[in-house]
Image: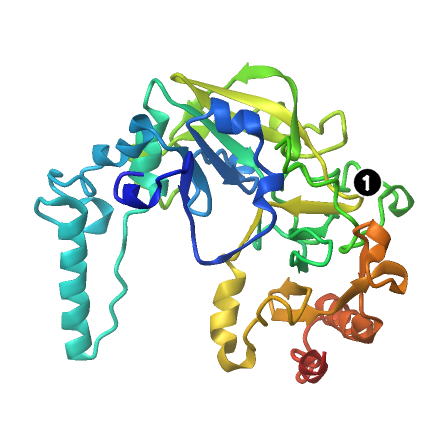
Amino acid sequence: GDVFRDYLDGYTHWSYTDLDLVAGDLTAFVSRAELVELDILTFTFGDAVTHGRLYLRGQFAMHRLSAATSRLWLACEFLAASGGSGGGAGGGGGSGGLLHELRIKHARATRAQQRGEAFRPHFNSAEGCYSRVVATSPTLRVKYANRMIADFTSAPQVYVLLSGGGRRAAVRMCAGSEGDGTAGGLVGSPMRPTASSSAPASQRAACDPFAPPPPPPRASLLGNQRPVGALIPLVTHTNCSEWVEPRYRVCADVSGAWASELGADGAANGWNFFYLAGRWYRQRFTASHPAGLIEGALFHFQVWKRAYKRQGPQLAPIPPPGESAAFVLTKEGYRPLALRPAGGSSTGAGTGAYEYDEALASIDARLKAIERDGDQPDDRFAYAGARGAH
């Protein structure tokens, strides 16, 4: 908001973000009330509930464009133009703030390149000092909203629908079940069967990744979540987020039974957190998702991208919009899906309902079998040829 202020004329809010994510329909996940009432809105992927982590996420942290938020970064010595030691986790050393730190890193990278050595610079992130500055500013109003999907707690397959042809963009997965990897709380996920509480399959909604979404709320900006009950005071501590320097940690006390209780709608981990004028709170919420599905504002790659790096040339580039209406992401990679309006209509009869081409159904079944039974020597990319054909 300060460094890039020349680009922000005409805007009311701004956010930093990451490259390792896929965005859904963000306008469906932000309400007008949040735009008006909050100084900062950041999206979490459930670890605020399961692990008590209260930090601004690098994937999404929307700031109101104001003097109060635009200068917060100056409170971090390694960023401030006349910062103190500038050392911290980034190891910048000396004084001079961010530019000095970048110059030091550039010099070290150049020297390593000349010597033929590997060099991986470490940068201070918003998860440390900046998050702490925000969480100790007595006048700010901040919300930590559970609205992202991340690969380390997601279902085995995540579907990405591109906008166009009557569809709105969506990032979604099938609602969780025991053992499928959705152990972390996800955007108010529907009730998951557990060893102590198991719902029969007949009582769980079938998963159709291409089901029509709820009506787009763009005009009124209602958002996809509704608060349930009053704000409840929250106790905090500093024993979480081990990668962050202890002096910067802010953690919610999630040791109480409330953190694992299901909501009235049967949702698990349906809590958002608030920092309002120097005090911490938690509040239940209920989220609107198509039956049997969980939809997120964003999907964040954290574990899968490491597998992608190892696979290297085996991964084909994701096709540009227009060549494929949707694609499915897994730990093995991605594959495009061809969508057509339900019932064969060229318009989808205005329902927004779409289904994927039956020619790809056998590929989908094969991939599920691989995930269920484990990789066989030649199975890992058994669908590669068909993927190219479709």
Is residue 301 left or right of 207 when viewed as pictured? left
Q: Quadrant of the N terminus?
A: top left
Among the 4 quarters of the image, the one containing residue 68: top left
* Residue for badge 1: 198
Q: Is residue 240 visible?
A: no
User: At label 1, which amino acid type do we have?
Assistant: Ser
Q: Residue at x 68, y 60 (%)?
A: 157
- Residue 310 location (% of width, % of height): 48, 74
Determine whether 59 is above or below 21 in the image. above
Picture quadrant of residue 268:
top right
Please provide percent x and percent y for residue 59.
Answer: 46, 47
User: Considering depth in this image, is 39 or 88 the residue closer to the camera?
Assistant: 39
Q: Residue at x 67, y 36 (%)?
A: 217
Instruction: Give coordinates of residue 176: x percent, y percent.
Output: 72, 47
The residue positioned 30% from the left and 33% from the top of the image is 70
- The quadrant the C terminus occupies is bottom right
User: Can I make out residue 149 in this image?
Assistant: yes
Viewer-nearest residue: 216 or 57: 216
